[in-house]
Image (cartoon, helix red, strand yellow):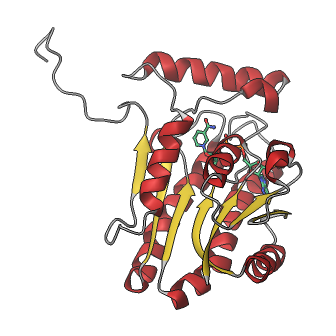
Amino acid sequence: MKQLLIITGANGQVGSYLAQAWAETRLPMLLLIHSDGRRLEKLSSRPEIMIKACDLRDLASFKAALDEACRALDAVPARLVHTAAIRSYDARTLAKGEPLIWSEIFNANVSMAYNVLKACLPGMLSGRFGRIVMFASNVVQTGLHSGSAYAAAKAAIVNLVRSVALEAAPDNVLINSISPAPVETDLESDYEGEYLAFRQRYFAAYRAASPTGKLVSMQELKRVAELLLSEELANLTGQNLVIDGGASAPLPASPETGN
Ligand SMILES: NC(=O)c1ccc[n+]([C@@H]2O[C@H](COP(=O)([O-])OP(=O)(O)OC[C@H]3O[C@@H](n4cnc5c(N)ncnc54)[C@H](OP(=O)(O)O)[C@@H]3O)[C@@H](O)[C@H]2O)c1
């Protein structure tokens, strides 16, 4: 049986970059989209790639897509890269925001993470091979002004990863999270109005404060994900890899002041 790579959020900015890059390997892939698949059009005729629309809040529909892909591509779930997420699109503080929007965002992010693991793990455990990368965010360390539901959900995902790592390690299933700081993405293509302005301010403030002065690059995310998906790993599991230009590193005493 061949090994299937599953990418969620595959029409998203990071997901579509990874899908297009890894399509060059010609390995079987299941690309999960939601409301839109325009970034994957070039991959739609490839025989080793299945693109399925699915709401990941619904476990049954994700399981059905996974089963169909395994049958059609003659493959077993072996690698999962979960990038799907919903942001705190209201950009309101907890005190001022609507309770229903807060719980929608928190619940969607946590239940999507639960559902993809719930559906993929049995096949990986029985096949005694799995490599899983869950996208979290550097906000698990910093918090996020006007984004507490998203930040709280990402922190939940990091701890979900730690727990599942303990449960799955004996069966050679390794799971880690990647927590990037703001990534070099085309904000204008996905956002508008107030929320676009909010994200632009946040990205500019981050870049100004980051020791490297750079946003996280797609290439960097791809290389880190490839490491975590590698068959050669045996013990790297349960970790949250923060990629933030050194912003969270403990800073040494300043050479100028001696402090
Ligand atoms: N970009 C950054 O600066 C940054 C920074 C830190 C962490 N991250 C994390 O990195 C990951 C990738 O980020 P990104 O910028 O590529 O995000 P993105 O462009 O917003 O993509 C997220 C994808 O998730 C999909 N999605 C949302 N709700 C869904 C649902 N109910 N069912 C299925 N799919 C659903 C969206 O599909 P639809 O649009 O069709 O709904 C979208 O394609 C995310 O987990 C994000 O939180 C990103």
Find residue 156 and report its image quarter: bottom right
**Farthest residue in the top direction?**
256
Residue 152 visible here: yes
Of 30 and 164, which appears nearest the observer?
30
Find residue 34 and report its image quarter: bottom right
Taking the image as shown, residue 248 lies to the left or right of residue 45, namely left
Tell me what residue is drawn at x 57 percent, y 33 percent: 183
Q: Quadrant of the N terminus?
A: bottom right
Q: Is 67 rendered above or below residue 37?
A: below
Of 86 and 225, which appears nearest the observer?
225
| Residue 245: % across, % down | 40, 30
Q: How many marks?
A: 0
Tell me what residue is drawn at x 77 percent, y 28 percent: 195
Taking the image as shown, residue 166 lies to the left or right of residue 52, namely left
Find residue 196 and report its image quarter: top right
| Residue 155: % across, % down | 52, 54
| Residue 59: % across, % down | 77, 75
Q: Quadrant of the C terminus?
A: top left
Tell me what residue is drawn at x 51 percent, y 26 percent: 215
Tell me what residue is drawn at x 59 percent, y 46 percent: 151
**Farthest residue in the right direction?**
35
Q: Is 137 rendered above or below residue 29?
A: above
